[in-house]
Structure formats: C-alpha cells, structure tokens
Amino acid sequence: MTYTTSSAPSRLSRAAAVIPAAGSGVRLGPGAPKALRPLGGIPMLVHAVRAMARARAVSLVVVVAPPAEVGAVRSLLDAYPAPPAVERIVVAGGATRQQSVGRGLAALPADVEVVLVHDAARPLVPVETVDAVIAAVRAGAPAVVPALPVTDTVKQIAAPAAGGGPEPVVATPDRSLLRAVQTPQGFDRATLAEAHDTHAGDDATDDAGLVERLGVQVVLVPGHEEAFKVTRPLDLVLAEAVLARRGGTDGR
Ligand code: CTP
Ligand code: MG
C-alpha cells in the first residue's frame, strides 16, 4: 500500500512508546507480576523498555506499572539506565489492558506525534520490527500492526463451553486470510487518542481494534517470530532459548 506524500510529515515527528506492564500474568502461574519476572536474569520489562529505546526515533518510554509496584518499577529503571536521550516515565495501570494503555496515553507530552503501544510481555521484539512500524506511521498510515500468518488451522465456536466440555464447531475460517498480530502497534497520536476516548468503556485486547471501530483503516506490516508474547510457562523456556541464541543476557 502507498500513502499520499501530502499527509507525510515534512520533518521527523517525535515518537514515544507506551508499555502496558500492569498485568499479573495469571496464565504464567503464581509469582511476581509477569513484567517483573526475570529473563536471562533481567526483568522482562527491562528487556521491553530496551527494545523500544533501541529504536532511534523513540525518545520517551512510558511504562504502565502494576499500581502496587510503581515505586519498585521506578527503582528498577534507575538500576538499568537507558541511553540519556531516552526519557522514561512510570504511571500506575488500570484493571484492564485498555485502561492501562489509556493511562499511559494521558501521560504523553503534547509534542509527541507518533505513539507505539508495546506489551511488556513481548520483551524480545527486534529493533527492525519497531523501526518498520514507525516508518509506516511516518509515511502516513494512521495505524500500523506487525503481524504473522497463522500456522494452526483455526476453528470458530459459538461460545466457550464451561468446564472444558466438548465445544461444537461452527466454522473454519480460511487460514490464508488470517493473521496473528503483535506489538509494537504504531499510531498517529491523534487517531489513537480519539479511539481510546470514543471507546473508553470497551475491553479491547489490542489498540488497533479500537481504531478499527472508528472506521479508520489499519494496516499490517510483517511481524517477527521473536516478537511472540510470553503468556504461558513454555513461552519462558522459548524466550530463554532466544536470548541464549543471541549470546548473553541481552545480546543486542
Ligand atoms: N496489561 C496491563 N494492564 C492490565 C492487564 C494487562 O498493562 N490490567 C498488560 C500486561 O502487563 C502485558 C500486556 O498488557 O504486558 C498483555 O497482556 P497479557 O499478556 O494478557 O498479560 P497479563 O494480563 O499480565 O497476563 P494474564 O492475562 O495471563 O493474566
Ligand atoms: Mg491479560
């Protein structure tokens, strides 16, 4: 897809990343909030902050922390400094991911024009993916999502069965038309703010979904297999293996 150059900014707009990190990680099992659990000896959140700060366009990272951990997260970020050109702010999250992102957006200074929203739970996204998302927004796309083809065949059911009982299948969508989406999702700041304001009461699992509800076109760019979300215990094993393959605790 191409974009008209008339909407492209004539100078490079300031980009900030909002990192929702306020979830507890129920599916990962008992323990500290997910974003604070270690990977290669370093909290997952620190990897995610570094992944955003590595992108040259990003000069601000807003971390949305579990409300009880705001002080601990500030101390943590002090213990793992970022490049001096990258400012970091910590705010308290809400009950849902959408509320947490909304609180992060409210903390952005007025001069930020491009916003990335990146899950703390995707600590290993490569900088090339981050850069590609920012570039597409700067080229004029209001909402950009990294995505990969789906590898499993997906079945649709009418409703989840209680207690793990059999679930009747209602459809098998054409897999070639399905994509699994990742973060960072990148936005024109005004578009994302409008989407969050208009749909404040929703509980969307991704920000692009809110922009779609405005009727604004969302586009996909290639995602990366290392941008997977750490959700269940086996994902931690994979994440440790990716770090080991990179060589060292952070490798890049
Ligand atoms: N998140 C958040 N605020 C919430 C819920 C989630 O900031 N109230 C963040 C998580 O910290 C995570 C991202 O949203 O970085 C994606 O959510 P998910 O992977 O579902 O993490 P959790 O909600 O922590 O995990 P679970 O659903 O297993 O409890
Ligand atoms: Mg969750």
Image: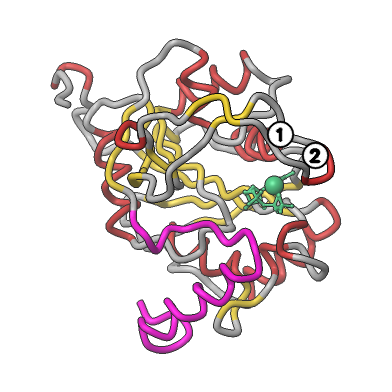
Amino acid type, callout 2: Ala
Q: Residues within 10 Å of mark 1 (few under 14, many from 20)?
A: many
Q: Quadrant of the C terminus?
A: bottom left
Residue located 72% across and 34% down the image: 160
Residue 158 rendering spot, x and y as whole percentages: 65, 24
Q: Quadrant of residue 28?
A: bottom right
Q: Quadrant of residue 10?
A: top left
Horizontal side of residue 61 vs 135, given as left or right: right
Residue located 43% across and 68% down the image: 83
**Quick check: marks 1 and 2 in contact, CB under 8 Å?**
yes
Q: Is mark 1 within 8 Å of ligand 1?
A: yes
Amino acid type, callout 1: Gln
Q: Say which residue label 1 marks.
A: 99
Q: Say which residue label 2 marks.
A: 95
When the figure is inspected, residue 18 is found, relative to residue 246, above or below; the finding is above
Residue 104 rendering spot, x and y as whole percentages: 63, 40
73 drawn magenta = no
Q: Is mark 2 within 8 Å of ligand 1?
A: yes
Residue 94 rendering spot, x and y as whole percentages: 77, 40
